[in-house]
Amino acid sequence: MSAVYGLTITLNYYKRYWDDTSGDTSTNDWGTSIYYFETDHEGNAIRQLQVFQNGNVLKYDTGYPEDKLGGLSAFPLDADEYEAYRIAGKEFERLWLTTMYKKFPEIVCTEDTLWGQPQLEGRRLTVGDIVSQVDVN
């Protein structure tokens, strides 16, 4: 349970092995994965991790719900179906705090392109070019 603005909220935590690859061209060769979910009392995902066999991690929450590689579960998890996969909140929290995931994976640094400056993948447009065009008044 968690208290927010004086309200008690019941959170649920689950860990479920997925014995197939993603099928997505960007992540398919990362291997099988384990999903970790933090859900509210209705089964809606609040935070989610997907830990792949090769060690890569995708990490989403309500503030960062999706990117080009995946996203937070769009459908509530069925409590009856997921009961067998329940874990302690401490296990989820430890993993959440100790895993790193590069938000905005479309921003890359490539030594041989644009002198290694951060850029949008597949484009010759640097992050600096974009920032310089934003009015910061």
Image: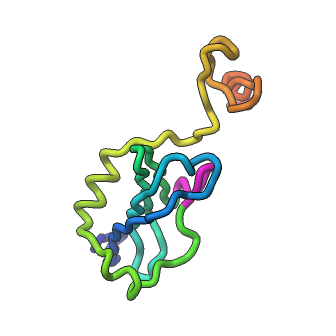
Residue 111: x %, y % from top left = 60, 15
Magenta span of residues: 63-71
Q: Is residue 62 left or right of residue 39?
A: right
Residue at the image position 43 percent from the left and 61 percent from the top: 47
Q: Is residue 71 above or below residue 136?
A: below
Residue drawn 64% across and 38% down? 106
Residue at 31% in and 80% down = 84
Q: Is residue 66 magenta?
A: yes
**Residue 34, image x, y percentages:** 39, 60
Residue in the picture at 23% in, 68% down: 88
Q: Is residue 53 above or below residue 4?
A: above
Q: Residue furthest bottom?
A: 80
User: In this rendering, would 47 be left or right of 93?
Assistant: right
Residue furthest to the top in view is: 115
Res. 51 in view: yes
Task: State the scheme by which the image is colored.
Answer: rainbow
